[in-house]
Image: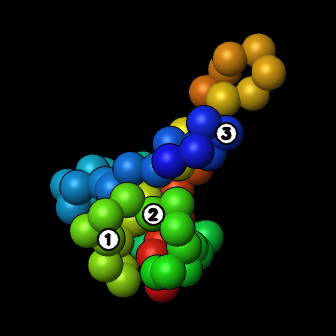
Amino acid sequence: MHVLQPKHSLMKPQEVEELLTKLNVSSAQLPKIKFDDPALPEGCDRGDVIKIERKNDEGVSTVYYRLVV
């Protein structure tokens, strides 16, 4: 991982279910990330959900979610 690359982590199935319920969406409605993206952590498969944590200039962390396709 590069120092400027945001942290990418694989979510557990239970976490994904809670997220989808909280957001009231299906996994197909999440933004996509390609399976061959070099930023993905090892062991990812198509259909997995990735949590991406980005920090802005003030150090405030923002979380994004992506579906691996």
Q: CA–CA distance between discs 1 and 3?
A: 21 Å
Outermost front residue: 2
Relative to 34, 22 lies left or right: left
Residue at left 75%, top 27%? 56
Q: Which mark is residue 4?
A: 3
Q: Which mark is residue 7?
A: none
Name the residue type under label 1: Cys
Outermost right residue: 57
Relative to 53, 19 lies left or right: left
Q: Foreground mark, 1 or 3?
A: 3
Q: Residues within 10 Å of mark 3 (few under 14, many from 20)?
A: few
Q: Foreground mark, 3 or 2?
A: 3
Name the residue type under label 2: Leu
Residue linked to disc 1: 44
Which of the two labelled residues, at mark 3 and mark 2, occupies the earlier sequence position? 3
Residue linked to disc 2: 40
Residue 27 on image: x %, y %: 44, 74
Relative to 17, 54 lies left or right: right
Q: CA–CA distance between discs 2 and 1?
A: 7 Å
Residue at left 54%, top 73%? 37
Which of the two labelled residues, at mark 1 and mark 3, occupies the earlier sequence position? 3
Q: Nearer the viewer, residue 53 or 13?
A: 53
Q: Residues within 10 Å of mark 1 (few under 14, many from 20)?
A: some
Residue at left 32%, top 70%? 44
Mark 2 touching mark 1, by CB under 8 A?
yes
**How many numbered discs sit on the rendered protein?**
3
Q: CA–CA distance between discs 3 and 2?
A: 14 Å
Does dot 3 land on a helix, a strand or a loop?
A: loop
